[in-house]
Amino acid sequence: MTPISCTSENMEYITGITASGGSWTPVFVVKSNINDCGCCGKCFKICGRGVFEYIDHPNADDLCGAKVMTVAHPDNCIGCGACARGCPKKNIVCEPCPK
Ligand code: SF4
Ligand code: SF4
């Protein structure tokens, strides 16, 4: 078996197949920054995999009980990238996953 190089140029990523049999590279959710979250709920509505959940902001007492969105179940992500595209605050990072 040929070893996989870990340099970014030679990195091999998990790939998927489109309906027509073409190849595509999924981008899986990596993180969202609760301090930059506008709490609009778009990512929660967009994601069909139940990855996001509201949590109390760590400083909720100072913010009158504010909520923020968190990546609660990253293992459910299928790598569609829709949450990152839909977040108006550009607050969600999705990346391809090395093999
Ligand atoms: S990439 Fe797709 S499946 Fe993954 S968390 Fe975002 S919307 Fe959900
Ligand atoms: S779409 Fe962005 S700003 Fe809106 S709740 Fe999700 S992470 Fe926060």
Image: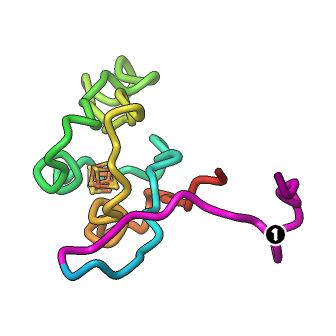
Is residue 2 part of the magenta span, yes or no? yes
Relative to 58, residue 38 above or below: below
x and y percent of residue 40 in the render? 19, 53
Q: Main secondary structure of the magenta part?
A: loop
Q: 53 and 28: which one is in front?
A: 28
Question: In percent of the image, x 39 and y 36: which residue is there?
Answer: 71
For residue 87, side relative to residue 15 (left or right): left
How many numbered markers are drawn? 1
The quadrant holding residue 19 is: bottom left
Relative to 72, residue 46 above or below: below
- Cβ of mark 1 under 8 Å from ligand 1: the answer is no
For residue 82, side relative to residue 10 (left or right): left
- For mark 1, what is the residue? 8
Which residue appears farthest toward the top when viewing the image? 61
Q: 45 and 3: which one is in front?
A: 3
Query: Judging from the image, what secondary structure is the residue with disc 1 in?
Result: loop
Magenta stretch: give its range. Answer: 1-19
Question: In percent of the image, x 24 and y 30: which residue is there?
Answer: 54
The quadrant holding residue 75 is: top left
Give the crowd class for mark 1: few <14, some 14-19, many >=20 residues within 10 Å: few
Question: In percent of the image, x 76 and y 66: which residue is there?
Answer: 11
Relative to 54, residue 11 above or below: below
Q: 67 and 15: which one is in front?
A: 15
Tell me which amino acid carries mark 1.
Ser
Is residue 29 part of the magenta span, yes or no? no
Q: 79 and 92: which one is in front?
A: 79
Question: In percent of the image, x 55 and y 60: which residue is there?
Answer: 95
x and y percent of residue 96 in the render? 56, 61
x and y percent of residue 2 in the render? 85, 58
